[in-house]
Every structure is written in structure tokens, then in C-alpha cells.
């Protein structure tokens, strides 16, 4: 059929510009990639060029995993209808998901996307608590829906973003490197920092109570992804959940990005913080690219919802194909021991990135859990000034080297690695070796720029360290 | 693998009760169906029993159409990633969709469900008009998301439903059979009725303006599905859109249920009303069961969105598999001339249902366009009193006859037919013949009940027509 024929990339770009909303995000907009094939941790462009995919956490068990493709294909040819009928795949998936969760998380709702899951989570919380106020973390992103943008400072903080509703309270990100309370600058123990950040949520709980409404819910990614690959300090969620529950609110763990074993030690990232949420949302990796997501909650909260008498219906949510695919993804995670692999390869990757810190002053912080890793670039380690332009440069250079990484955080200076879980030691080595080389080029660029500055600026103490640093910072802004 | 083994239905029910939210809708809850297979317009339960599917408008080109399954399967094994990369299938789908729409509807956004599409539509309208107030139709349903329930009186009207926000204005459903203005009771021409209903929207526009905010958007299904298969009178949308636009609002046509040729004469139901919306949302049939949906709008509105600088990203929206499947659905609609078929079979079905009116006084109204048909049951044709219990009985009896139909409308008394578009003349005949038989049983039941009433009630004029009718009504309520 005509539509199956491929067209030149220029034609694809032309059609995209004409018929797809310009607001839609695109990587490398000035020279975008056309990706036509994916296998495991690799993606291929239209010319057959192979890219190492270090960011596609959706392709969790690897691009086009044959077991997942087969499951989708089989079920597609059997039946795909809505969940107003019974189907084994749905209840089996529910049972298997629940088995991975701590008690009393045992009731599922299936939906099509992480956004839909978070929307339903908030709706459940509202109905259960009969309250409206929500506490969210600064820079958090919970989805593209109207209701989610309202609790996503990642969008609210943008110049053209919508206004924050009065019932949304923004707590500081528990970022111990560049947040409100840092380590070791503030000379506190990690546990103490966790308590201090949690107390900030406690303050907001009291604020919401004094406003009259009281807290409905606290929603947070268990490890904040869009905020810049943030690993909260020990005890943070434990203390935070305590504050929220004492105020009568429920705790929602958004595991859409970080769930399904990515952290290596546990299936769910909230487990690394030793808490049990009231509502958990899962998505992206769940279908390895297929649109499927879920909300898992307690029988008590599910009952509050049912008691309204208002039925819930989601046309595709929990359809047999989505469930068969999600079941197949769980099979692969188990059979290929991908969680253990994430632990092993993730630790190797972290250690190797840690090594970069000794070689490049640009590398300010390295953090992560399993295959969720962030490398924060700074122009000055003392002031921890974000190296935004440098991060952008690194992303583009890595793409030239056929390695796809991205950056995030409020200053877009955190390099982000969240590869498919089939990522191997060799892949990690290639990633870090190349990054090492690219950072070295940047060191070189910095030196030449600094020399240039020194040459053109007739300052007496040009050779002093301070001026050199200040000049170098100015110069780097221009890169 | 263990999970692929089927389990006894009782076990499926037990697991569903334990692990799936009780708020989730289920057909025939006391004795639900377990559906394991679908082919064209038929579904099969676990015992191999075959059901004629008269309601699954999502399985638009027929359950498990091989061309669609093949397209999904092929693309699933090639690549499924997000639309931050270029892909031909997405731009081709956009081009093809746009080709079916009138100018200036030419810019697409791909999402995963009708709910997500309507949410984005409203967001686009808000950003473009910088206003908030929305006019919606009574009994309308636009999706399960928080933002959609706010504009869905179908949910707001329920006893346990949430409160209607003040910025939502509810216009009467343009139901000429049992609505505010009816035909021929009010002795008006259809065109005049259309104007009268549109004037109701005009009044709300003025109300919104006097409140200070002004109208952001009018959102309506082009033919209201959840409201009870409503066919608006001629000139309704034309006059309504005029009012809304004069007030500075935009017009959103929700084609999620009624689009893709179902009405037989046109690809989109709004075309039957000779209007051009500013934003169109499409969904359900688009992926024949696969979660894919879209928003199509004007370059002007898309530009307002892009101009905010806030990028839009939907993880699965427009992924290559969803687009390949949607392209395959368009292929089948074209190649099998399903729109023409909907016209031919739909007209036959309508005519045959019209015939039932002469044989059963329960049948109050028969209406439809193509394969979107409603049969409204009433206990009294003069007062047009809804026959709710009878409609429920009919649904259950038809299920016993292995025919799946449903009911809708504020009084749940409208039998609803919206079968896969491969539905044939023979299927229509079987549906109507069986319905004829079931209605005849009900006539019998009515008579025996009436006799019973007459026997036990010693009224003098028991034989008079009036008392007989009143008794019969009472008796029927008890059925």
C-alpha cells in the first residue's frame, strides 16, 4: 500500500511541520532524527545508522522484545474489547501487579497512560478525603492533562505556563546537591536533611489546614525524574508521609518513570524509602511502548470511589491486548532478571560516572539508583552554578557519536540516563568513555576561550585564579 | 506460560472482585459475559457461544480485522517509540485525517483516548480564547478525566456525582422527541426547532458574557450518544455555532463515538449539520480497539498553543504502532467502502425498526443516521413516558438470544445500536426479528399483568381505555 512506502526525511519534516502541532516536542529540532527500527537498547535511523539508546525508559525490556511483540500479536488476533466483559488477562495482570506491592495495595484500575493514571489517582484521593488541596514538589511533572499540569510546577514555572491554582502547594525538591538544604554544605547528615525537607511538607500541611480545606494528597515521584534525576535523602518520604497522614491526607507515589525494577534493588522506587503509599500509579515501562497504565490502591479508597455510585469506564483501559502485553513485560522482567541486571549495570555505570568527577571539573554531582542515573554539570563546583550550555553541547556531541542521552532539571544541566533495562556493561562503558572524551573536548574549549578572554581583556591580575574563573564562566555562557 | 492458561469463569469473577475496583462498569453484573474471541461483528464467550455484537462501535472495521492486526503486528516488531523522533506513519496519518476534514482543519495532535483528546481540545480552546466558560449539553458525556467530568452532565447529574463548576453552562439536549421543544407536539418545523434549541445556547452565551468571563467553548457530540442517540434537528449546530462564535467562543465537535463514516453519508457527523468546527476530537473507532485518538484543529488555534512556549508531550501519542494501526483502519474503511455500507445497512435497519413502531406501542421513537440508531421505548405514546424497566428487560432477553445491545439516555429507555461497520443486512434482520419477538413477549406480559390488575381491582369502569392504560402503566413498573 502506498502509505507503507517510506519518504525522504525532508518530506517527513515538511509534512510534520504542516500537519502536527508545533507545540509537540521534538528532539534535536533543527536536525531531528528519523527512527525506523529498534532492537533491544539500539535504535536505527532511515539510513541504517545505529544509536545507543540511553533514555528510552518506555522500551523497558528492550525495543521490540520478541516475547512482548508475540503476546501483542496473538491477543490482537483473538479479541480486544473493553473491560465491561470479563477477561483472564486483566485479572491475572491485576493479581501479578498486586503481588509486587506491599499490603494493603491490592485494587487496580487500568488506564491508557501515566497521565490518565495520575488523574484517576487524584480523583480517588479527592473522593476519599473529601478535600481538594494537593502538595506537590517543585519542578515535578505528573502528566499532560489539564488536571496534571495544575500539579506540575515543571509546566507551571514556565513563563507561558498556566497560573498555579490556590489549592496547589509546592514543596521544595529534596535535592541535596542544589536544593534548599544541601549536603555537605549544611553539614547535616542525610537523615537530618530528609527530615528538614519533610518538615517543609509538614509546614504546607498546616498551611492547608489553616486555610480551612486541609490536605487531600501529597503526590510525588518516588525519585524525581523531571526535576533532574533527584534521589531524595534517606527518611524523606517516611517523614513526609507521616506529616501528610497526620493531616488526614493520602500519599500518592508516581512510579510512572521509575517503577518496574529500574532502581535495581526493588520493583518500586518507593520501597527504597521504606514507605507504603496509599495510591501508586504505574505506566510507561508497563507496556514497553504500548499505551497501558494503572492505578493501584487500597480496598478502603477503592470502596470510597465505588460508594459514590458513579461508575468508572475507560474504553481501552484493561483491554485484553494491553493486558497481554503488560503480562509479557512482567514475564521478561522476571525471566531475564532485569531488576538484578539494573542493579549490576547501574552500579557499574554510577561508579564509572563517579570516575568522571575526578577528571572533569564540569561534573558536579553523580547520583542514581540502578539504571536511573543523573550527572549534574556545573561551571563551578563551589557555587554549584549550573552548566546549562555545556549540557546542551554534550547532548548534541553525544548524538554525533551515535549515543542518545537527554538533560533535565530546572536548569537543564543534568545529563539523564534511563536506558532500556537490557543495557549492558559494555554499553555503560561506551557511554562513559564517549562522555569522557566529549567532556575533555569541552575542557579544551574552555581553555581556549579563557585564553581568548585573557588576551582581549587587559586586566592586571588576569593570571589570578579568581578572574580566570570569572572569565571562564562568562566565556562558557557564550558557547 | 502459566498466565496464558484459561481459568474457570467463577475464578475470573473472584479475582476481578478482589483486584479490580468495584466502580468499574460491567455489563450484566449479576451474570457477566466472559468474552475470549472476536471476529467481524461477532464475539464468542469461553464456551464458544457466539454473540451478534450490536454495540461495539470501537471494533469499527470488525473485531480483529486481519489487515489491522497485521499492521499492528508488523509495526510492533519494527519500532514503537515516542514522537520526539520523526516517523512516516504519523505524518501520513495526519495527512490522511486532514484530507477527510474541511478547511481550515489541518493540524493534528495525537493522544491515547477520546478523554485525552477532549481534555486537550478544551486546553487549546482556553489558551486560544483566554477564557474559561464552557457550554455543554445536558446528559452529555465527554470522558472519564477530571476535566471531562466537569463538562459531562451525564456524570454531574448523578446523585453521587461531583458538583457542576460555575463556569460550566448546561444547554438543553436538542431532543425533539422528549426534550424541551418537541415535534410534532409543538407544531414547529424541524428547522424552527433547531433554531429554538440553538437560541438556548445563545442565551447561555449572553449569561457567560454578563458574568464577565465570556464563552471559551461550546463542546458537543455531533450526534449525542450518551444522551440517548439524539439526532439534533436541522440547522441546530449551524445556529448554535453562530451564537458561540459571535460571543467569541470556539466550537468543539466531539466525534469520538460517531465519526469515521458511521453516519453513512459523511465521514464526520458534524458534516450532516453543515458546519465546520474549530476543533474536532476523534477516538474510539480510530484504532479498532487500540488506544489511539486525535485532536484536529486550525493552524490559528495550534499557533496560539505553540506561542505559549509550553511544549506538549504525550508519551505514546502518535507512536508508530498506533499510527500504523490507525492508517490500516482508514485503509479498510476505504477499501471495503464501509461508509457506504453503513448508509445501506443503516437505512435498512432504521426502516425495519420503524416497522416495529406499527406493531408495538412500546416503541415510541425510532431515529438514527447510518449505523447509529436509537429505539426509544415508552409506556405511553401520548405522554412519552420512558419505559425504563422494559428497556432493561429487552437488553437481558436479547442477550439470552445471543444478541448484544445496550440502552442509554437520561431514563435508560433508549435501545442503542452502534455495531461494527461490517454489520450486514442479515444481521440487521436478525436483530429486528428477535427484537420484534422480545417486544411481543412484553406485550403479552403487559396484557397478563393488566388482566391481573383488572381482576384484583374492583373498579367500575375497568374496561375503559383510560383505566386500562393507567393500570397497565402501574403494572409495568412492577415488571
Image: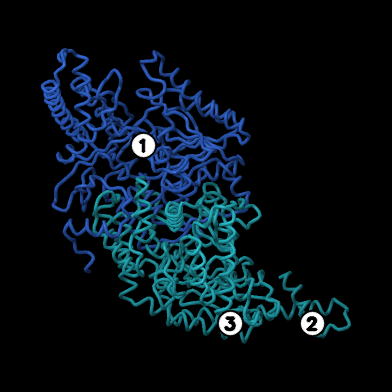
Chain colours: A blue, B cyan
Q: Nearer the viewer, mark 2 or mark 3?
A: 3
Identify which residue, B354 or A261, lies in the foreground: B354
Disc 3 crowd, CA 10 A, few/some/many (<14, 14-19, 20+):
some
Task: Determine if residue B82 is in view.
Answer: yes
Query: From the viewer's perspective, is residue A121 above or below residue B26?
Result: above
Q: Are marks 3 and 1 on the same chain?
A: no
Disc 2 crowd, CA 10 A, few/some/many (<14, 14-19, 20+):
few
Residue B417 drawn at (x, y percent): 51, 73
- Locate residue B461: give its quadrant: bottom right
- Locate residue A341: give its quadrant: top left
Label 1 near label 3: C-beta < 8 Å? no
Residue A330 drawn at (x, y percent): 37, 44
At x 34%, y 33%, the residue is A409
- Could you tell which of marks 2 and 3 lies nearer the N-terminus? 3
Q: Nearer the viewer, mark 3 or mark 1?
A: 3
The residue that label 1 is drawn on is A226
At x 43%, y 19%, the residue is A193
Disc 1 crowd, CA 10 A, few/some/many (<14, 14-19, 20+):
many
Q: Chain of mark 3?
A: B
Residue A78 drawn at (x, y percent): 38, 62
Label 1 near label 2: C-beta < 8 Å? no
The residue that label 3 is drawn on is B189
Query: From the viewer's perspective, is residue A401 above or below residue B248?
Result: above
Q: Are marks 2 and 1 on the same chain?
A: no
Q: Are marks 2 and 3 on the same chain?
A: yes
Which label number is shown at residue B466? 2
Identify which residue, A426 or B209, lies in the foreground: B209
Q: Is residue A206 left or right of residue A442?
A: right
Q: Chain of mark 1?
A: A
- Locate residue B478: give its quadrant: bottom right
Amino acid at each position: 500500500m502506498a502509505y507503507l512506502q517510506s519518504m525522504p526525511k525532508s518530506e517527513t519534516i515538511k509534512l510534520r511541520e504542516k500537519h502536527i502541532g508545533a507545540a509537540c516536542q521534538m528532539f534535536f529540532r533543527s536536525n531531528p532524527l528519523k527512527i525506523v527500527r529498534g532492537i533491544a537498547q539500539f535504535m536505527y535511523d532511515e539510513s541504517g545508522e545505529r544509536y545507543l539508546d540511553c533514555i528510552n525508559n518506555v522500551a523497558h525490556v528492550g525495543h521490540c522484545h520478541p516475547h512482548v511483540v508475540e503476546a501483542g500479536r496473538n491477543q490482537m488476533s483473538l479479541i480486544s474489547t473493553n473491560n465491561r466483559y470479563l477477561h483472564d488477562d486483566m485479572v491475572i495482570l491485576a493479581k501479578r501487579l498486586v503481588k509486587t506491592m506491599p499490603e494493603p495495595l491490592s485494587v487496580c484500575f487500568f488506564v491508557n497512560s501515566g497521565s490518565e493514571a495520575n488523574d484517576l489517582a487524584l480523583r480517588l484521593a479527592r473522593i476519599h478525603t473529601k478535600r481538594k488541596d494537593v502538595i506537590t514538589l517543585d519542578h515535578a511533572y505528573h502528566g499532560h492533562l489539564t488536571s496534571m499540569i495544575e500539579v506540575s510546577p515543571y509546566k507551571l514555572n514556565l513563563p507561558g505556563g498556566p497560573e498555579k491554582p490556590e489549592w496547589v502547594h509546592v514543596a521544595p525538591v529534596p535535592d541535596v546537591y542544589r536544593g534548599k538544604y544541601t549536603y555537605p554544605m549544611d553539614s547535616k547528615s542525610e537523615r537530618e536533611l530528609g527530615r528538614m525537607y519533610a518538615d517543609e511538607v509538614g509546614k504546607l500541611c498546616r498551611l492547608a489546614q489553616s486555610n480551612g480545606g486541609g490536605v487531600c494528597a501529597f503526590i510525588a515521584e518516588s525519585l524525581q525524574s523531571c526535576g533532574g534525576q533527584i534521589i531524595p535523602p534517606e527518611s524523606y518520604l517516611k517523614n513526609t508521609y507521616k506529616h501528610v497522614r497526620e493531616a488526614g491526607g493520602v500519599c500518592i507515589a508516581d512510579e510512572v518513570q521509575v517503577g518496574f525494577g529500574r532502581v535495581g534493588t526493588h520493583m518500586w522506587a518507593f520501597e527504597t524509602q521504606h514507605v507504603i503509599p496509599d495510591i501508586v500509579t504505574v505506566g510507561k515501562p508497563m507496556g514497553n511502548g504500548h499505551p497501558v497504565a494503572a492505578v493501584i490502591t487500597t480496598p478502603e479508597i477503592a470502596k470510597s470511589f465505588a460508594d459514590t455510585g458513579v461508575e468508572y469506564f475507560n474504553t481501552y483501559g484493561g483491554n485484553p491486548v494491553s493486558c497481554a502485553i503488560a503480562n509479557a513485560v512482567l514475564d521478561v522482567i522476571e525471566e531475564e532478571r532485569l531488576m538484578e541486571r539494573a542493579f549490576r549495570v547501574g552500579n557499574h555505570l554510577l561508579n564509572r560516572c563517579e570516575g568522571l568527577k575526578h577528571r572533569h571539573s564540569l561534573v558536579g554531582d553523580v547520583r542514581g539508583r540502578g539504571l536511573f542515573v543523573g550527572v549534574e554539570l556545573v561551571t563551578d563546583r563551589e557555587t554549584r552554578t549550573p552548566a546549562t550550555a555545556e549540557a546542551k553541547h554534550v547532548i548534541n556531541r553525544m548524538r554525533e557519536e551515535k549515543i542518545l542521552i537527554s538533560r533535565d532539571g530546572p536548569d537543564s544541566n543534568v545529563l539523564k540516563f534511563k536506558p532500556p533495562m537490557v543495557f549492558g556493561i559494555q554499553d555503560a562503558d561506551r557511554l562513559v568513555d564517549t562522555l569522557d572524551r566529549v567532556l575533555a573536548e569541552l575542557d579544551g574549549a574552555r581553555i581556549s576561550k579563557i585564553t581568548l578572554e585573557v588576551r582581549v581583556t587587559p586586566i592586571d591580575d588576569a593570571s589570578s585564579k579568581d578572574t580566570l574563573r570569572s572569565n571562564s564562566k562568562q566565556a562558557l555562557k557564550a558557547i
